[in-house]
Image (cartoon, rainbow, N blue to C red):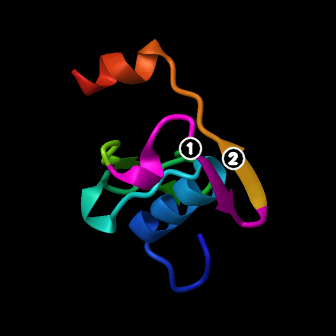
Amino acid sequence: MDEGESPAEAAVRELREETGLVASIDACTLSPPLALSPGLTNENICLVTVQCDLSLPENQPGAAQQVSRTIIAGTWVAFFRECQQ
């Protein structure tokens, strides 16, 4: 996470940077803080689930997207279709 960024903002930003998929912060579900190594450190993590609207033009299969100066070509497999059902 960048300084001043919420877990949901970081998740949406990372999703966009790594995959080219666009999502809204409103589409995020956050877990409560989870101890990463109980008894060893005081580190906590937060799991974020993000739902993407795959009907948006920018999230369509096969669309090449310019993201952080990297071209990402979307390739969709049956797994993603199964998740939509």
Residue in the foreground of this view, choosing between 68 and 2: 68
From the image, tell me which residue sits under label 2: 72
The residue under label 1 is: 63
* Residue 55, image quadrant: top left
- Residue 80, image x, y percentages: 41, 24
For the question of whether residue 25 can be seen, the reply is yes
Q: Residue lying farthest left?
A: 85
Mark 2 element type? strand
Left or right of residue 33: residue 64: right
Report crowding for label 1: few under 14, some 14 to 19, many 20 or more residues within 10 A (C-alpha).
some
The segment highlighted magenta reads 56-69
| Viewport quadrant of the N terminus | bottom right
Secondary structure beneath disc 1? loop
Q: CA distance from mark 1 to mark 2?
A: 8 Å
Q: Are marks 1 and 2 in contact (CB under 8 Å)?
A: no
Quarter of the image where the C terminus is located: top left
Residue ranking furthest to the right: 69
Q: Earlier in the sequence, mark 1 or mark 2?
A: 1
Q: Residue at x 44, y 70 (%)?
A: 9
Residue type beneath disc 1: Ala
Q: Is residue 58 magenta?
A: yes
The amino acid on which the numbered mark 2 sits, given as a three-letter code, is Ile
Which corner quadrant of the image does residue 2 belong to? bottom right
* Residue 29 percent location from the top left of the image: 28, 53
